[in-house]
Amino acid sequence: MKTGRNRTWVSIRKLIVRNGFYSAGHGRNRGGLAPDRWRFDAPSLTDGAALAGRIVELSAESLVDLRATGLRVLLDSDEYAEAVSAAARDLGVAANPAVLQQLSVVFESVNPSDVRHFWQGVLDYAPGADGGLADPLRRDPGVRIRQSAEPRPLRNRIHLDVVRPAAAVEQASPGEPSGPFGVCHRDIDGNEVDLVPGAEFGEGIGTADWQEVWSAMANYRITSPTQQRHLVAAVAARADDAGFPFLIDLRPGLVIIDSGKDQWDRDAHGLELEFTDLAADLQIAARELGATADPALPRLFQLFLDAADVDAVRAFWIAALGYTPDRRDGVNDIHDPRELSPVFVFQELDATETDRRQRNRIHFELAVPSDLAQTRLATIVAAGGQLLGKSEHRWQLADPESNELVLLTEA
């Protein structure tokens, strides 16, 4: 699988509607919004899979994130834009740029190289062009690492949860774990991650291709765009028949089938189905098409905030990110309704832990299209956000407990 190649990306600056497909001129933006991200609305996974199949037949290097409400597309070259436009028009699939946004995690460190090395191993990320780190599969947020001259010895109120297959966690070997569950690791600055070993999903050979990493996930290697198209169509059809909104990601040489965090559990999905049976059915379909499972790849990445006033902090992030609350009682998770960005989790700060009264070493950056920035800024401030500073195309904000978010737009 080709994950490290340089690509020719098309900027979404100055979006132009062209036969229902959004494209633009070349260039990389200053504000941080990843280039060449397009969103199409579709009424079902099956409808989205039809367009996804045409896209990968045009260009096997394209990336497609298929969801029950639509798909996000990253083309490797703008030469395919007109052909994708025609395919979308033929299938009655409409472009929708209003939902484009990109979240990044930023570490400020006096030891950038050591911090980078630690997180590269924990996340299984690749070096990024800006000195940070990037998910080779482009599913999880990028990590930016910035030089800081200010040592901050106290604990963050923000940490990461990463769940990977048990063998991958053992191979990462970031040091001796600590904490009540024996999964907490710290980089040289003290930034924390709960690195949790996953497990095989279900029991028996019927779901052997699946891993439980707080979501149920199967990653299949494929050998041709045609095989990829057939597998995605088969998964989409079965998912639609069951009414289950799988996350289906197409990558060069790969199809990722993901339930979403906890969604394989009946309490979370609220559907009248047995998820294990559905997973087994998809495994049969994948194997019949000649796809081969890769059990090393599954990974769940979520962001965890400790707060004294969970309700106030959670309300801020719901508004800032455009997220929705988890449907379950007593669960403080919030989710991206587009199912493209990581889950945020909130926990009440232990009253005995008073050693967190410093500016966090971790903050978040959220890039949105320029024509949506002022509306999003107003929404954030109305939800209790503090405007700490601003410059061209950039607003530094904080939630009610001083966790920071930088809102970016393109230059």
Image: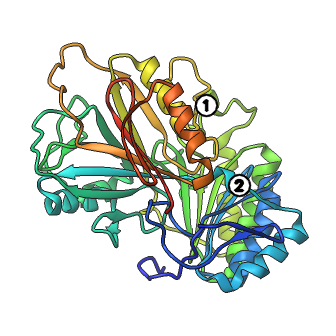
Q: Nearer the viewer, mark 2 or mark 1?
A: 1
Percent x, y of residue 187: 17, 49
In the rendered image, the vertical position of residue 156 relative to residue 73, given as above or below? above
Counting residues from the start of the chain, the first of labels 2 and 1 encountered is 1
Outermost residue, top direction?
351
Which residue is label 1 attached to? 268
In the rendered image, the vertical position of residue 310 relative to residue 35, given as above or below? above
Percent x, y of residue 43: 83, 51
Q: Amino acid at mark 2?
A: Asp
In the rendered image, the vertical position of residue 193 relative to residue 59, given as above or below? above
Q: Amino acid at mark 1?
A: Ala
Which residue is label 2 attached to? 281
Residue that appears at 48% across and 32% down: 317
Q: Nearer the viewer, residue 389 or 238?
A: 389
**Residue 219 occupies quadrant:** bottom right
Percent x, y of residue 221: 55, 73
Residue that appears at 43% across and 54% down: 392
Residue that appears at 33% across and 64% down: 133
Asked whether, in this view, residue 164 is left or right of residue 36, the answer is: left
Q: At numbered mark 2, what does the secondary structure look like: helix, strand or loop? A: helix
State if disc 1 and disc 2 touch (CB < 8 Å): no
